[in-house]
Image: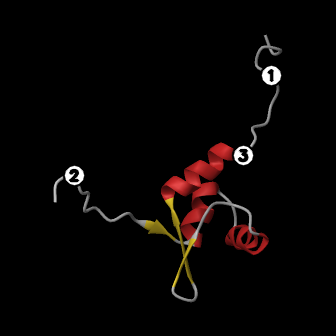
Amino acid sequence: MKGTNNSIETLLNEYDVARFYGLSVATVRRWRWLKTGPVYRRIGGAAVRYRAADLEAYLQSRPTGGGNSAAAQ
């Protein structure tokens, strides 16, 4: 089986996600309830897990604050 990658990706729980973003677990749960926030996977009936790549993609998709850097000069 040439070219296959046998590594298993580590999945994160909602506590890890809250720590990653510096937010409360309640915020992460609210995102799921409102169907916003990063992509997640449901495993079985209740377990919810997140991929680190999805957390980073969500962060990159959010608007940034501040002003125009050219105007600050």
Marks 2 and 1 in Cβ contact (< 8 Å): no
Vertical placement of residue 73 versus 34, above or below: above
Display coloring: secondary structure
Instruction: Tell me which label, 3 or 1, sits earlier in the chain.
Output: 3
Give how far across and how far down residue 29 sits, in percent: 70, 73
Q: Earlier in the sequence, mark 3 or mark 2?
A: 2
Which residue lies under the disc numbered 3?
A: 62
Q: Residue at x 26, y 57 (%)?
A: 5
Q: Give the number of the disc on residue 3.
A: 2
Q: Which residue is mark 1?
A: 68
Disc 1 residue type (three-letter): Asn
First in sequence: mark 2 vs mark 1: 2
Q: Position of residue 53 (x, y in %)?
A: 50, 53
Which mark is in front, 3 or 1?
3
Q: Residues within 10 Å of mark 2 (few under 14, many from 20)?
A: few
Q: Residue type at mark 3: give it.
A: Arg
Q: Residue at x 16, y 60 (%)?
A: 1
Residue plotted at (67% across, 45% down)? 61
Q: Secondary structure at mark 2?
A: loop
